[in-house]
Image (tube, rainbow, N blue to C red):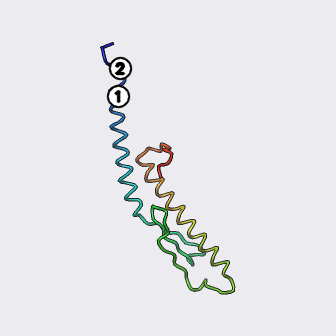
Amino acid sequence: MAKGRFPGMGNMGNMMKQMQKVQKQMEEMQKQLEETEVEASAGGGAVTAKANGKKEILSIKIDESVVDPEDVEMLEDLVLAAVNEALRNAEEMMAKEMGKITGGMNIPGLF
């Protein structure tokens, strides 16, 4: 063995460069996805919620036909269902797009 050399160390440098490249791609994609909007609705479109990739609710639209003072609970359920679905859609969109870069590797704390 040559003095001062360790087997496989050249590969380690290449692997580190590759990881840095993947990290940069992930950061760029995450910024882009944070600006992407997803939408979900409940009650046949009576309530619609829009979220972004940061999992923030951007807007909620409620069709006036479902605003019934006698049945506030139904409206609350529709809003809750639409918001939860919008957040699930945002999570799925982020996971799908990040999976394209990571090749399906499970990286804890990625997003």
Q: Give the foreground label among 1 and 2.
A: 2
Label number found at residue 6: 2
Give the residue pinned by disc 1: 11
Q: Amino acid at mark 2?
A: Phe
Q: Residue at x 35, y 38 (%)?
A: 18
Tell which circle, 1 or 2, labels the residue nearer the N-terminal end: 2
Furthest-front residue in this view: 4
Where's residue 24, x and y in %? Answer: 34, 47
Q: How many labels, in total?
A: 2
- Among all residues in the image, which is located at the extreme right? 70
Residue 82 appears at what percent x and percent y? Answer: 57, 70
Residue 12, horizontal then vertical, whole percent = 36, 30
Q: Secondary structure at mark 2?
A: loop
Kindly indicate the quadrant of the structure image that contains residue 3. top left
Q: Is residue 105 left or right of residue 76?
A: left
Q: The disc labelled 1 sits on which kind of residue?
A: Asn
**Mark 1: few/some/many CA within 10 Å (<14, 14-19, 20+):** few
Residue 20, which numbered label?
Answer: none
Residue at screen point 55% across, 80% down: 62
70 above or below 3? below
Residue placed furthest toward the left: 3
Query: Where is 101 relative to 8, above or below?
Result: below
User: Observer-nearest residue: 63 or 22?
Assistant: 22
- Residue 76, given in percent of the width and then of the height, sits at 63, 76
| CB under 8 Å between discs 1 and 2 | no
Seen at 51% across and 62% down, the residue is 89
Q: For the view shown, which residue lies furthest in the top direction?
A: 1
- Residue at the image point whose x is 38% and y is 57% from the top: 31
Residue density around tag 2, few if under 14, some if 14–19, many if 20 or more, within 10 Å:
few
